[in-house]
Image (spheres, helix red, strand yellow):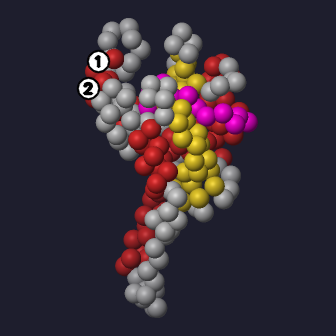
């Protein structure tokens, strides 16, 4: 990874010595707004030097294990690689995946004590792909959070689907869908709910 690309650029040369500069004020208000918008489950994130995740895309065969968080920030190269791996395999369209989804998966992985990569059935889904899948009785929502990069359908080797579902529900974060006939669990960063 290119450490320079993921480093924070600090510009304090224009700071106002009598008080907050305009830039500092904007940073402070943005940080405050983000803190207020942070979901309650994010408080379960332990302070660590890095957070790693591994994925195997079952449709493309691509796999990746990397640290996506280092030294207090997301690693841009890792996030871009995850976005690519979780692209719509039908159209090859890449979208930004919600950072909170990775954090949620990190907590889930830690809760289960697994060292296995998540097997991905579906990550991002383009509106076109979603429309094709959202037929009556399919269980695919027309307004699916997959289209916003806020949902993923997964399974985890050496972990029963029931255990994966129960661990996800215990986090009390986002949506958890259980699809035993299709052998996956749906996780999203929407409101807390289950089906």
Label ID, residue 132: 1
**Label 2, residues with CA under 10 Å away: few <14, some 14-19, many ≥20:** few
Label 1 Cα neighbours within 10 Å, binned few <14 / some 14-19 / many ≥20: few
Residue 193 appears left or right of 89: right
Q: Which mark is residue 148?
A: none
Single out the residue that lies furthest toward the bottom: 17
Expressed as whole percent of the image width and height from the top left, the position of residue 6 reads 49, 63
Q: Residue at x 30, y 30 (%)?
A: 91
Which element type, helix, strand or loop, lies under badge 1?
Answer: helix
Left or right of 87, for residue 153: right
Q: Quadrant of residue 40?
A: top right
Up-down relation of residue 166 to residue 25 (above or below): above
Disc 2 designates what residue? 128
Dividing the picture into quadrants, the one containing residue 154 is: top right
At horizontal 46% and vertical 91% (from top left) the residue drawn is 17
Q: State the CA–CA distance, disc 2 to disc 1.
A: 6 Å
Q: Residue furthest left?
A: 128
SS under mark 2: helix
Vertical side of 29 occupied by 177: above or below: above
The residue under the point 69% across, 40% down is: 110
- Choose between 33 and 12: the one closer to the eye: 12
Residue range of the region highlighted in magenta in the rendering: 113-123
- Is 122 magenta? The answer is yes
């Amino acid at each position: 990874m290119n450490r320079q690309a993921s480093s924070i650029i600090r510009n304090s040369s224009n700071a106002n010595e009598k008080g907050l500069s305009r830039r500092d004020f904007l940073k402070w208000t943005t940080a405050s707004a983000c803190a207020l918008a942070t979901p309650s489950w994010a408080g379960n994130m332990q302070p660590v030097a890095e957070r790693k995740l591994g994925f195997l895309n079952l449709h493309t065969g691509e796999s990746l294990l990397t640290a996506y968080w280092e030294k207090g920030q997301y690693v841009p190269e890792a996030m871009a690689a995850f976005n690519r791996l979780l692209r719509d395999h039908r159209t090859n369209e890449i979208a930004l995946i919600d950072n909170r989804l990775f954090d949620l998966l990190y907590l889930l992985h830690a809760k289960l004590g697994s060292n296995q990569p998540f097997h991905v059935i579906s990550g991002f889904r383009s509106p076109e792909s979603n429309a094709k899948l959202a037929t009556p009785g399919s269980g695919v929502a027309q307004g699916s959070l997959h289209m916003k990069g806020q949902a993923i359908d997964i399974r985890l080797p050496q972990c029963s689907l029931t255990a994966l579902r129960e661990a996800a529900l215990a986090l009390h974060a986002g949506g958890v869908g259980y699809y035993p006939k299709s052998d996956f669990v749906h996780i999203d960063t929407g409101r807390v709910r289950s089906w």
